[in-house]
Amino acid sequence: MVEVAKKVGKVAVALLALAGCSGSGQQSGSGSKQNQTSTYADSLWHVFAKALDDKNTSYLAQNSLDTLQCTECRPDSSGNNHRYPNAVVLNSYLNELKHLPSLNGIPFSASLDGNTIRIVYTIQSKNAEEGAYNLLFTLVNTATGWKLEGMLLT
């Protein structure tokens, strides 16, 4: 009987650990399909976020569109919708693209809509009009896989 209780306890601890390992992403929706797509989007984003944190420009160059949207890269620019060649962004403005010192451990929401994944970080800031602003990253599914389209602030 004691052995059975120990096994049940170990299984309960393992289940709790797995439940806590769903990542920093916040899943929305109650349907199981939504949770599956959110989990997929979360896990895909974790790879990109790690590459950004690690400054892995080789991975990012291979997994980004030819032009990246980056509202923080050249704030004085106008008329180009804040889109720049990915080599310029990755070589000169990687910290501006990432926007935060680290994306690791910061809660985010991920949504998959057709061929687009949107990752939203809500950043608390006393300087923001409503006390917070959104940092939004977009991934698009292309013929060669998921690619980073860029970031913007809202």
Image (tube, rainbow, N blue to C red):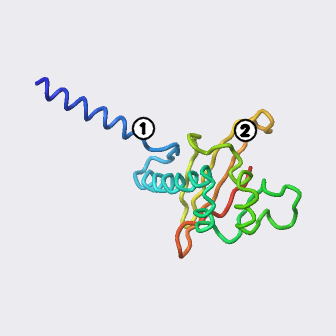
Q: Residue at x 58, y 52 (%)?
A: 49
Residue 100 occupies which quadrant of the picture?
top right
- Residue 29 percent coordinates (x, y): 49, 48
Q: Is residue 104 placed above or below 59 in the rendered structure?
A: above
Amino acid type at mark 1: Gly
Quarter occupied by the N terminus: top left
Give the labeled residue for mark 1: 20
Closer to us: 121 or 102: 102
Mark positioned earlier in the residue sequence (1 or 2): 1
Q: Secondary structure at mark 1?
A: helix
Of circles 1 and 2, the one toward us is 1
- State whether residue 95 is above or below residue 10: below
- Horizontal and vertical percent position of residue 146: 55, 66
Which residue is disc 2 drawn over?
Answer: 132
Q: Quadrant of residue 121?
A: top right
The reply to whether the C-beta atoms of the residues labelled 1 and 2 are less than 8 Å apart is no
